[in-house]
Image (cartoon, rainbow, N blue to C red):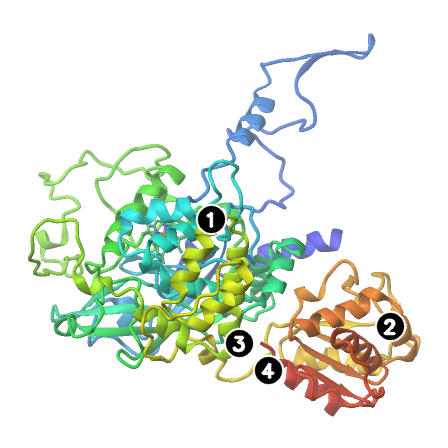
């Protein structure tokens, strides 16, 4: 225990020391205190506290009497007051999240289209903070539920903060922001009984999306494997809305922002996600922390899609419509930068909980567009921070920019800044704090002088009414197994709807996408089987929609979690070889045994396992390996849970490896899973997807084959 505390203190000291390369991290140091210091505890007003265990009260040892509390106890009162007010309102959506610090760099300048320093200066390293999130659930809900994931990036640029408040899905449910309260009400727990938590699998959500045909495209994305990512580190990030870039010549280019992960895009299978929600509700949060802590820093390529202003109307969809992607064949992605997360937060609340993003936070060289969803968002984010954090929320350490902030905004609850001088208005006789245009100083923000015409009306133009083409494009572009997963997800969701009107209508909508899909879902959710495709689907496909298009450029098992199953009598040679092989590829080995006390090898050496069989489940690992050792294999074979470990991993299509005697356990488990008897212990299982075995216990080739195979793990 003492050692663990010492390690933590060292970690804190290290992190405080490591500030030179990141301006934001350096800025945060002003507010960091060491909770492990040996200094005497004080009240918030600074006096040393003598006793932390007892409230001041009227008591008498002699008569053995403990009387009532004294209200006089300012120390006891302060502690309770502070505790009573610890909670702030959770975010109205995206309440559950995890964050980390990192850096952003441009490899290629975008000066042809933008004058923003952050997008043009290739010598800069811009500090960033990212918060990933789920949308539907409360702050304490599970990480692995089926949902859209938030991907919000704050760039602390030299010209001020720039926020991309994006998602892992490139389109949105609705075209107009005025509908946002309705979609959120519909997807959140139903108001009468407040169920279900963090689930879209209920009548209200499917009622809403049926009644909004524009939501069809996005609900297909959410029901695909994108809705259950394996890790925050393995998802794409999309700014979703259309922004403008403005170059030094004052020309405008429309733009979408995209982040693509170096590790590729990967998902759970639904059974894993479901089980993990109970077995480890913090799975994604821990995964992010663990990877950064082990130095496996998550990385994304940063790209833009660009459309010249004069080409705005040359597409058969409106490029300002957030329910549409810009197909890559029409608008290629230009990858120009990279983003890396390399530092965990020191404390969750002041950093991850208090970070506040606004789509309206842009810097000179970047501007908005008339995307109606974005226009509404620009109002909403600032507004919501007021009720979450108060008017001075931009002074909070995690939110304050790294460049100077100076203006005549004053006062309000929780004001930190002390501004000297008599002047707090503009214009003033001292010409203090002038706007840039007054002094002809370059760098002031100028809104793009866009020409607009029309009449004031609540309407959108006809192009916005094509709700199906891109929904079909997405579904057509999925691989065979992604289509099957989507059908299964829809069936699961609609099975949870108990009003026939709801699931029958949704199946009816699916007939406008793909008849076979509609029929598969109808069969399982209980709707009548439809017989006709009700809208023509010309079968168009596009690159970049299936996540199979985003396998890592170089296969890697970096940061993957690999369980090694052993019991007393394991073979230390094959065990050590696999541990070394895993570590050499920057993956993480975890030893699992029937007990957590030291396990003895056949040669008398021993190892203390990381976990015992029932403390963890195969769902928490990407792969399972069984080393050799006759006694070990015999023990494991006799334990139902050990066989279940391998069987379950096999069922989830995970890479499984075994050498020597360990093969017996894998064979038994796989036979159970398949319901067939294998021919013998030496029969190679390589034909079976994801299983690699080698008969010889020290068959390093066999072991590295297994490692190679793990690379191809989903
Ligand atoms: Fe939103 C939070 C992403 C539409 C209103 N949104 C929020 C977060 C993300 C997104 C990632 C969490 C930020 C964080 O980690 O603190 N939202 C999106 C995307 C949208 C979108 C990609 C579609 C393109 N949002 C949207 C609309 C509105 C909002 C149309 C309202 C008109 N969103 C909010 C909000 C939240 C929010 C209520 C809740 C907490 C917060 O802002 O800071 O203002």
Nearer to us: label 4 or label 1:
1
Nearer to us: label 3 or label 1:
1
Q: According to the image, label 1 marks what residue?
A: 203
The answer to whether the residue labelled 2 contacts the one labelled 1, judged by CB atoms less than 8 Å apart, is no
Q: According to the image, label 4 marks what residue?
A: 712
Nearer to us: label 2 or label 4:
2
For disc 4, the neighbor class at 10 Å (few under 14, some 14 to 19, many from 20) is some
Check disc 4 and report its element: helix, strand or loop. Answer: loop
Q: Name which of mark 3 and mark 2 comes first in the sequence.
A: 3
Residue with the most extreme top position: 63
Q: Name which of mark 3 and mark 4 comes first in the sequence.
A: 3
Q: Name which of mark 2 and mark 4 comes first in the sequence.
A: 2
Task: Answer left or right for 379 relative to 671.
Answer: left
Q: Could you say which quadrant of the image residue 419 lies in?
A: top left
Nearer to us: label 2 or label 1:
1
Which residue sits at x=84%, y=85%?
Answer: 660
Compare residues 82 and 193 and report the one nearer the observer: 193
Q: Name which of mark 3 and mark 1 comes first in the sequence.
A: 1
Q: Is residue 168 visible?
A: no
Q: Name which of mark 4 and mark 1 comes first in the sequence.
A: 1
Q: According to the image, label 2 marks what residue?
A: 637
The answer to whether the residue labelled 2 contacts the one labelled 4, judged by CB atoms less than 8 Å apart, is no
State whether residue 353 is above or below residue 598: above
Compare residues 696 and 188 and report the one nearer the observer: 188
Q: According to the image, label 3 marks what residue?
A: 481
Q: Name which of mark 2 and mark 1 comes first in the sequence.
A: 1
The answer to whether the residue labelled 3 contacts the one labelled 1, judged by CB atoms less than 8 Å apart, is no
């Amino acid at each position: 225990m003492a050692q663990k505390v010492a390690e933590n203190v060292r970690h804190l000291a290290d992190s405080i020391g490591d500030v030179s390369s990141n301006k934001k991290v350096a800025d945060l140091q002003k507010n960091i205190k060491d909770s492990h210091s040996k200094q005497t505890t004080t009240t918030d007003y600074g006096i040393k506290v003598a006793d932390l265990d007892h409230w001041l009260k009227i008591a008498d040892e002699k008569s053995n009497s403990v009387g009532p509390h004294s209200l006089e106890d300012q120390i006891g009162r302060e502690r309770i007051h502070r505790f009573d007010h610890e909670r702030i309102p959770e975010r109205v959506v995206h309440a559950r999240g995890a964050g980390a610090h990192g850096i952003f760099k441009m490899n290629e300048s975008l000066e042809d289209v933008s004058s923003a320093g952050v997008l043009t200066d290739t010598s800069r390293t811009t500090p960033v903070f990212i918060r990933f999130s789920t949308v539907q659930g409360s702050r304490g809900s599970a990480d692995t539920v089926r949902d859209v994931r938030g991907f919000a990036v704050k760039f602390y640029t030299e010209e001020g903060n720039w926020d991309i408040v994006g998602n892992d899905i490139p389109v949105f449910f609705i075209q107009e922001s005025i509908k946002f309260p309705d979609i959120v009400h519909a997807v959140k727990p139903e108001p009468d009984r407040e169920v279900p938590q963090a689930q879209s699998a209920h009548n209200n959500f499917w009622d809403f999306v049926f009644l909004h045909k524009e939501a069809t495209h996005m609900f297909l994305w959410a029901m695909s494997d994108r809705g259950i990512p394996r890790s925050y580190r393995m998802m794409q990030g999309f700014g979703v809305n259309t922004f403008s870039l403005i170059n030094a010549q004052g020309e405008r280019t429309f733009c979408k922002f995209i982040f693509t992960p170096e590790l590729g895009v990967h998902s759970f299978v639904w059974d894993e996600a479901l089980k993990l929600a109970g077995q480890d509700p913090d799975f994604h949060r821990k995964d992010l922390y663990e990877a950064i802590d082990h130095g496996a820093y998550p990385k994304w390529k940063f790209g833009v899609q660009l459309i010249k202003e004069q080409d705005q109307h040359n597409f058969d969809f409106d490029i300002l419509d957030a329910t549409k992607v810009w197909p890559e064949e029409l608008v290629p992605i230009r990858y120009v930068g990279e983003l890396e997360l390399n530092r965990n937060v020191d404390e969750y609340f002041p950093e991850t909980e208090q970070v506040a993003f606004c789509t309206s936070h842009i810097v000179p060289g970047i501007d908005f567009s008339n995307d109606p969803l974005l226009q509404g968002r620009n109002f909403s984010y600032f507004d919501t921070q007021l009720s979450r954090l108060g008017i001075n929320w931009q002074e909070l350490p995690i939110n304050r920019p790294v460049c100077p902030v100076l203006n005549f905004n004053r006062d309000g609850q929780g004001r930190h800044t002390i501004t000297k001088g008599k002047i707090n208005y503009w214009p003033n006789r001292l010409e203090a704090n002038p706007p840039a245009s007054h002094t002809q100083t370059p760098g002031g923000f100028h809104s793009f002088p866009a020409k607009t015409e029309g009449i004031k009306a609540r309407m959108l133009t006809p192009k916005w009414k094509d709700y199906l083409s891109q929904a079909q494009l997405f579904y057509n572009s999925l691989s065979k197994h992604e289509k099957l997963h989507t059908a299964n997800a829809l069936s699961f969701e609609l099975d949870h709807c108990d009003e026939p009107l709801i699931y029958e209508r949704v199946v009816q909508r699916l007939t406008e996408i793909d008849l076979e899909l509609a029929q598969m879902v109808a069969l399982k959710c209980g709707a009548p089987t439809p017989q006709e495709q009700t809208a023509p689907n010309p079968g168009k496909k596009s690159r970049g929609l299936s996540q199979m298009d985003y396998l890592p450029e170089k296969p890697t098992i970096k940061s993957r979690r690999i369980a090694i199953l052993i019991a007393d009598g394991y073979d230390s040679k094959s065990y050590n070889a696999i541990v070394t092989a895993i570590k050499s590829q920057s993956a993480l080995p975890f030893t699992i045994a029937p007990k957590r006390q030291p396990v003895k090898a056949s040669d008398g050496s021993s190892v203390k396992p990381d976990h015992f069989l029932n403390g963890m489940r195969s769902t928490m690992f990407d792969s399972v390996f069984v080393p050799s050792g006759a006694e070990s294999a015999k023990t494991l074979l006799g334990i139902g849970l050990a066989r279940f470990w391998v069987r379950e991993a096999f069922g989830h299509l995970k890479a499984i490896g075994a050498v020597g005697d360990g093969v017996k356990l894998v064979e038994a488990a796989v036979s159970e899973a398949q319901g067939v008897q294998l021919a013998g212990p030496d029969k190679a299982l390589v034909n079976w997807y994801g299983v690699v075995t080698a008969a010889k216990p020290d068959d390093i080739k066999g072991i590295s084959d297994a490692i190679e195979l793990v690379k191809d793990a989903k």
